[in-house]
């Protein structure tokens, strides 16, 4: 296997020495980049962009041409899984993703197909293979999936939600139906992420965007236990290389210790927690990814640099920090500000790695 030219991101996830703190941005490929909008127009719509290996590869690489990012992330979406399970995904202008056939009863769950990652989801694996070829081992490729709970919220609510009443009604009135859905999703995610690893993903991340809407008692039951099941069955090494896994529960700061107990390599942090506190709580066991407020990218270059410096100082000396935003980059952020951010992480972090 040829060596990665820049392996800072992988090394940091395993808490090994690096020369600078690695950095990437959640949603780094997307509508804040004019070149993304051009490619998306060429594709016609978002899912056609995801289904074309060449165009998905093109947009994956776009942010890497502009910024000195230490990792690429597969261009796709978490909702490819429910789509492949037969729910009929479509995107609306105003309300984001929607499903033609949402889940509302036991029969709906029983009827779900278990997708074959090299069948219904082969377009995702083709994108991974194409991107790996075009990356030429410059930086590692991150694969990803939604968590079972987060995927289930979209499948039961029929799209994005604010109050999550439909899925919570199911959780509290007919928990056995929801558990059978979450179990099917966990099995599907295991197959999907293992296939991404076999296709060439060098690290994987699980997005539990909506785990934080659960009560402190329900989080383990409906989200964390299924992510733990996934972690227990993922390829943790492949083709002679260890595969690091990151878990990100947005609004999940109260559960950092439990998340570290799953055996993941890294915890993704949103911006609401002080990274020094997070490091004190779990930093001896796992790496930490994060955690600048994405809205800080609206600020002046001086303010962005100051915030980067504060977060680096909060983590302090020692290994195991992957710099990132605390959630996805906003679509109206000036790309120049993203460059200021990435460069600041590299420039200002050298002193912590001597
Ligand atoms: O990070 C990256 O650059 C890789 C690509 C990526 C996308 N979605 C592309 C995308 C990743 C990792 C995701 C994950 C994703 N998708 C999550 C979890 C992470 C998070 O942000 O919390 C979630 C919840 C989704 C579901 C989803 N996909 C929504 C709610 C939307 C609509 C919102 C919006 O911004 O329009 C999408 C569409 C989507 N996924 C876009 C992109 C670039 C915008 C589509 C477009 O071009 O119009």
Image: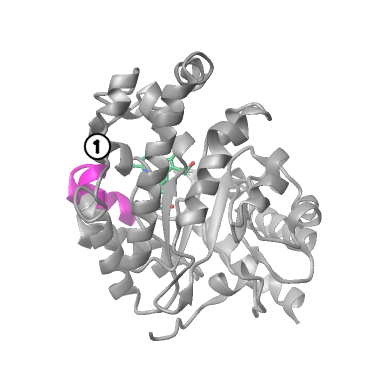
Q: Give, as a single range, the part of the protein colored magenta.
A: 34-50
Foreground pick, 42 / 112: 112
Query: Is the C-beta of the residue carrying label 1 under 8 Å from the nearest atom of ligand 1?
Result: no
The vertical placement of 169 against 329, above or below, is above
Q: How many circles with numbers are drawn on the protein?
A: 1
Q: Position of residue 166 (x, y in %)?
A: 45, 17
**Colour scheme in use:** one colour
Foreground pick, 306 / 77: 77
Question: Which residue in the structure is indicated by mark 1?
Answer: 113
Q: Is disc 1 placed on a helix, strand or loop?
A: loop
Foreground pick, 186 / 323: 186
Q: Position of residue 7 (x, y in %)?
A: 52, 77
Does residue 325 appear to the left or right of 45 in the view shown? right
The vertical placement of 6 against 340, above or below, is below
Foreground pick, 330 / 200: 200
Q: Position of residue 21 (x, y in %)?
A: 64, 70
| Residue depicted at x 26% and y 50% | 50
Q: Is residue 222 visible?
A: yes
Does the magenta-highlighted stretch encompass residue 61? no
Q: Is residue 328 visible?
A: no
The quadrant of the picture occupied by the C terminus is: bottom right
Q: Would you identify the image quadrant in which residue 105 lies? A: top left
Q: Would you identify the image quadrant in which residue 63 lies? A: bottom left
Q: Position of residue 86 (x, y in %)?
A: 23, 34
Q: Quadrant of ligand 1?
A: top left
Q: Dot 1: within a 10 Å radius of its alpha carbon, few (fewer than 14), some, or many (20 or more) residues?
A: some
Does the magenta-highlighted stretch encompass residue 49? yes
The quadrant of the picture occupied by the N terminus is: bottom left
Could you tell me what secondary structure mostly forms the magenta stretch?
Answer: helix
Q: Residue furthest bottom?
A: 2
| Residue depicted at x 30% and y 63% | 128
Does residue 312 appear to the left or right of 340 in the view shown? right
């Amino acid at each position: 296997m040829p060596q990665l030219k820049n392996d800072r991101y992988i090394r940091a996830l395993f808490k090994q020495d690096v020369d600078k703190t690695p950095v990437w941005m959640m949603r780094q490929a997307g509508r804040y980049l004019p070149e993304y909008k051009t490619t998306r127009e060429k594709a016609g719509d978002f899912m056609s962009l995801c289904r074309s290996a060449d165009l998905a590869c093109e947009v994956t690489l776009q942010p890497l041409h502009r910024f000195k990012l230490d990792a690429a992330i597969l261009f796709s979406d978490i909702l490819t899984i429910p789509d492949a399970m037969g729910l009929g995904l479509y995107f609306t202008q105003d309300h984001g993703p929607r499903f033609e056939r949402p889940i509302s009863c036991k029969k709906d769950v029983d009827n779900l197909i278990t997708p074959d990652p090299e069948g219904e989801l082969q377009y995702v694996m083709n994108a991974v293979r194409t991107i790996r070829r075009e990356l030429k081992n410059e930086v590692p490729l991150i694969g990803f999936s939604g968590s079972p709970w987060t995927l289930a919220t979209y499948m039961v609510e029929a799209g994005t939600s604010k109050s999550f009443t439909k899925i919570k009604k199911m959780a509290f009135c007919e928990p056995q139906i929801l558990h059978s859905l979450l179990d099917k999703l966990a099995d599907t995610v295991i197959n999907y992420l293992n296939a991404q690893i076999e296709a060439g993903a060098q690290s994987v991340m699980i997005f539990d965007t909506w785990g934080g809407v659960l009560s402190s008692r329900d989080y383990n039951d409906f989200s964390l236990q299924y992510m733990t099941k996934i972690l227990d069955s993922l390829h943790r090494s492949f083709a002679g290389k260890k595969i690091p896994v990151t878990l990100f529960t947005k609004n999940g700061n109260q559960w950092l210790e439990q998340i570290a107990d799953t055996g993941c390599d890294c915890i993704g942090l949103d911006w609401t927690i002080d990274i020094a506190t997070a490091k004190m709580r779990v930093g001896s066991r796992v790496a930490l990814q994060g955690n600048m407020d994405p809205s800080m990218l609206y600020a002046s270059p001086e303010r962005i640099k100051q915030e980067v410096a504060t977060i680096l100082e909060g983590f302090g000396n020692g290994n195991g920090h992957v710099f990132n935003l605390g959630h996805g980059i906003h679509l109206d952020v000036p790309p120049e500000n993203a460059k200021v951010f990435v460069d600041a992480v590299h420039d200002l972090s050298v002193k912590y790695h001597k």
